[in-house]
Image: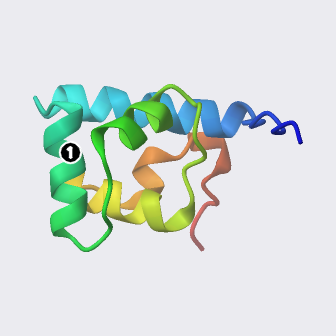
Amino acid sequence: MATRPIEIGPAGIRTARNIERLRLARGLSQQQLAERCTALGRPMTNTALSRTERARRRCDVDDLVVIATALGVAPAFLLPVSLVAPRG
């Protein structure tokens, strides 16, 4: 049985780019960020993180929350601005 390709839309691609951009701004390698995520209770390999950043692996909500926490930001900070609903 053939594996169905992963389809990641524009929001997922922008989120993946935001993760990479912020990781690099923090001076972290993929291995270091993956280790932080694992230490926070969400086991993650650097391969999984690499595939997430390249939009080859979906970033589910649990991944998003732990990656954001490991980077020291709110999860909404990693989402494309156009997807974040205004407060009020």
Q: Is residue 11 left or right of residue 4?
A: left
Residue 14, x across and y down, in percent = 57, 31
Q: Secondary structure at mark 1?
A: helix
Residue that mark 1 sits on: 33
Residue 66, x across and y down, in percent = 33, 63
Residue 63's image quarter? bottom left
Q: Which residue is nearer to you in this view: 5 or 74?
A: 5
Q: Quadrant of the C terminus?
A: bottom right
Residue 87's image quarter? bottom right
| Type of colouring | rainbow
Which kind of residue does numbered mark 1 sit on? Leu
Residue placed at 89% from the left, 42% from the top? Answer: 1
Q: Is residue 78 left or right of residue 56?
A: left
Q: Is residue 65 left or right of residue 33?
A: right
Residue placed at 27% from the left, 55% from the top? Answer: 73
Taking 75 as reference, is 21 above or below it?
above
- Name the outermost residue toward the front: 1
Q: Which residue is nearer to you in this view: 28 or 83?
A: 28
